[in-house]
Image: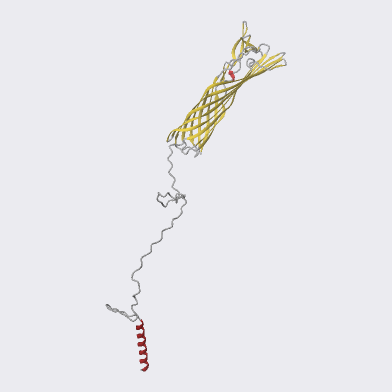
Amino acid sequence: MTARRLTACGLALLAAGRASAAPPVAPPGLVLTSAFGDPFADRPTELPPLLTPPPDAPTPCPVCPPPDRPRTDYDPGYLYLPDANPAPAAAAPCPCQKSGRWWLAPTLELGGTKSAFVPALLRYGVADGSGVAAGRAVYGGNRVSLPFRAGVGLSAGAWFDRCQTRGVDASFYHLQEGSAETSALSDGSPLLVPTTTAGRPTFFPLAFPGVGGRFRAEYETRYTAADVNYRRTLLCDGAVRLDALAGYRYAHVGEDLDLSLTQMRALGTAAATDHVHAGNDFHGGQVGLAGAYRAGRWSADLTGKVAFGTTFTTTESRGAAAANGTALPIGFFSASNAGTRDGTHYAVLPSVNVALGRQVGEHARLFVGYSFQYLSTVTRAADVFDPRPDPSGTGPRREEGTSDFWAQSFNLGMDWRY
């Protein structure tokens, strides 16, 4: 019992000590005081006011705005780039149906040129009461027909702009040399060659009874043309297109005529050869129109051009003869006008091309067509030599003449466009 009492007294003393150490709590309406005074008397009841932050120091700038202009966030001294590339503006639609930025079209040509009129250079002799008179012509007195021959053509071009309305094109055209040869041989039948004696027209007997004779003539013609043009679209409405052309045109007409006379006598042979050359180079400015129509895979093209310019002509006539072992530097037909001459003539060169084609792939087109070209003024080989020469060379010099010329051909080609 004594132990239990001692334990309870200890616990009571411990609780009393803790209560004395805690501050006294006053009941409502009662203010407690102690020997130590009020513990909350020195504590502040309000917070002091906040201090004003100092102003920002001015930031230096490379390029400052004038004082009278308000400063903004944009600084003209810097290069500002967008956050992303802006979307490209939509391109305006093209009015023309595109047909390739550039093109190339080779062709195989089959054509011919205008025949040349050659005066009668050899005639049959017809016996009459007073001797031998000139009969019908053996060679000449009509046009010398030249055969159709092969040739080549090439056209190419390119567009400068996206819509294919401004560009350049060029073309080349060539026909192979055409040749017509005529030979006549007589073992004594009269053959007469026109000539001039003492200023009067007469005939030289190339062959007569007892004396044989041989005559040979060869006529050759060549033609080449080329042009380059600036192309500008005038009309473009779906499948129909019309372009204007302006540029430069060149053409060359070259001809040669070779004549040979041989007289076969019992005492020997006499021979004379003549060569005549005529070269014509045309240079001129050109204008034209080029139209095209497209319907599905089929197409039709029509091009017309006309060039105005000058034909520069160079002619040459020369010959040689041999009789009884003696050579002479002069021929028979060139005796009156031997030498070289130059001349110029105003000329016009129109041309037309028609083609019908069909698309055979994404980039290729097969076509057939027709081409015609005309040159108004040229000097041909038949215009150079003297049809009634004076073998003595004492007669007046014959002046060369002029003619016109044309070339035509049918063609087959392939057109590539990319």
Write down the quadrant of residue 188 in the picture: top right
Q: Nearer the viewer, residue 125 or 87?
A: 87
Write down the quadrant of residue 313 in the picture: top right
State whether residue 258 appears in this view. no
Q: Residue furthest left?
A: 29
Vertical placement of residue 122 versus 3, above or below: above
Q: Residue furthest bottom?
A: 2
Left of 81 or right of it: where is 36? left
x then y, percent, for residue 36 = 35, 80
Q: Nearer the viewer, residue 412 or 17?
A: 17
Vertical placement of residue 107 versus 92, above or below: above
Coloring applied to the structure: secondary structure
Vertical placement of residue 61 versus 207, above or below: below
Left of 343 or right of it: where is 293? left
Q: Quadrant of the N terminus?
A: bottom left
Vertical placement of residue 34 versus 180, above or below: below
x then y, percent, for residue 299 = 46, 34
Write down the quadrant of residue 293 in the picture: top left
x then y, percent, for residue 100 = 49, 38
x then y, percent, for residue 52 = 38, 62
Residue pictured at 37% horizontal, 91% vertical: 6
State whether residue 213 appears in this view. yes
For the image shown, how many numbered marks are present on the structure? 0
